[in-house]
Image (tube, coloured by chain):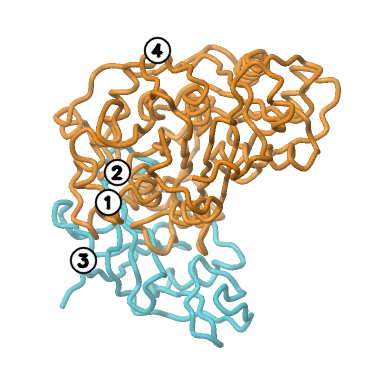
Chain colours: A orange, B cyan
Amino acid sequence: MKLDQGKDNACIVGVGRSIISRDSGKTALDLVTDACTNAIRHAGLTRDDIDGIATNQMSGVNGYQINEAMRFPTVNWYGQMEMPQVTAAWSVMEAAMAVEYGASDYCLVVMGLMKPKGAGSRRDPFAGSVGPPQVGGDAQWVAPYGGNGFTFNHFMSRYMYEFNAPRETFGHIAITDRKHAMMNERAIVRTPLTMDDYMSARWISEPFCLYDCDFPVDGYAAVVITKPDRARSLPNKPVQIVAASQNTGPRTDMFQWDDMTNMGSKYAAKKLWELVPGTTLKDIDVVMCYDGFSVITVMWIEAFGFCGVGEAKDFLKGDMMQLGGSGIPMNTHGGMLSEGRVHGMGYIAEATDQLMGLCGERQVANAKRALIGQGGSVQNADMLLQVMD
Amino acid sequence: MTEEYTRPIPIPDAASAAYWEGAKRHELTIKHCNDCGYYIHYPKTRCPNCWSTNVGDAVVSGRGTIYTLTIHHVPSAPGFETPYPVALVSLEEQEDVRILANIVECPLEDIKVGMPVEVVFKDATPEISIPVFRPRKG
């Protein structure tokens, strides 16, 4: 890998998290400010330094609310992705561009989830309605059939059909994540998980069983981003955003995706590798692959080229992608399947911790480069992080 | 209709009115570009393939193939008893027209991806009928 790739690019200089909990008893904004305060202090910065805020619609808060809660003296740039977008990488990429452009000197990026509770949650979307619910817009094609907006089980169905892939393919993802979560005290679920547990778990929405689906939580994570010259004078080893990409294919309705044996990750991975010519998986020390549902992870693994399309069923056997295993360790924090759904920012926080050497028992020795793939179906982003020389 | 219909009911809009009017007549009606021949779903009045606005409504065969299959064990709407099947059906006329629908008149364990199916209509209200699919006969 060419070490001068991305040498002028923005760096992550601090990481912070709120508590991650099934029911925090706090508001989204309070959790967001916990994560932001921790990230700013970790970076060795103060209130007066921060002049940019990026988040997106799915965090449940916006930049104005964050600033009202934290009172930065002047905010020069807000990034507020309004499309439903779970990839925190997308917001990090926006912030990096803002910093490199000079719009912001020190930019905060925060993302996470406030677990839906009670009426209106996914468990009971029509709770409280009197008589048959009336549905318009895109829901008119889905709700009359008792469908929901989560198409990932359809992707898994098609993948299994086309490649004759057994359920164990996806079980390997859940088991790998859980093994890692047992070394992460923040993780929501830390009990051992076996293939027998996976195969006998209750169905949620076939082909999804319980362990194919991540755990919704109350939890947020934040990072601070600045230029390399500023990053050098701060206490942490700067983590440079060497390359990043966010992409869709020609179809952007989740049910109308053209080929459900893959996702937008194939476009994102192709673009990312084009941005770093000469770099290959051999240069990567740790990888994060989005696991909101296990099928998304399988498709990222294939998109990045760990194995060919349809080959994950054989590739993932054994300890491949586990810490101490024979491949590149993946989701060392346990992913969203075990740490909890911090909406993508969990992977960026963990990758940064790995590159800063902060991961304790689950630290990947001498980790210099991390590959991150985020999002699934139509919405995807990825990035390559590297410890700055 | 002998039982009260409690499932969600679609609200037709300017683009989808012909689809739901067709369903009421028990005809599957898909927007169709008169210039390039592309079938357009979800309905739009400008063809996403060639950007022509010369778009009409075509009654299609109602024949298709199950492209994906899910079995819901947690209900996502009122009126459904679990487990129930939700499939994407790829239409015979054009593979990338995919209609999400329940599969009816078939035991759950016999429904498979790749199965040939045909449309039937479930009358929900005097104004709205819902297209669903059953295994193709003959």
- The numbered disc on residue B85 is 1
The residues bearing labels 4 and 1 have C-alpha atoms spaced at a distance of: 39 Å
Residue shown at 33% from the left, 47% from the top: A306
Query: What type is the residue that disc 1 sits on?
Result: Pro
Residue shown at 50% from the left, 48% from the top: A380
Q: Are marks 2 and 4 on the same chain?
A: no
Q: Do the numbered discs 1 and 2 sit on residues whose CB atoms are within 8 Å?
A: yes
- The outermost residue toward the bottom is B35
Q: Nearer the viewer, residue A29 or B118?
A: A29
Dot 2 falls on which chain?
B
Marks counted in the figure total 4
Which residue in the protein does label 2 denote? B72
Q: Nearer the viewer, residue A199 or A312?
A: A312
Position in image of residue B108 (x %, y %): 18, 51
Q: Secondary structure at mark 3?
A: loop
Q: Secondary structure at mark 4?
A: loop
Quadrant housing residue A326: top left
Circle 4 packing at 10 Å, graded few (<14), some (14-19), many (20+), is few
Residue shown at 36% from the left, 29% from the top: A337
The residues bearing labels 1 and 3 have C-alpha atoms spaced at a distance of: 13 Å
Which residue in the protein does label 3 denote? B115
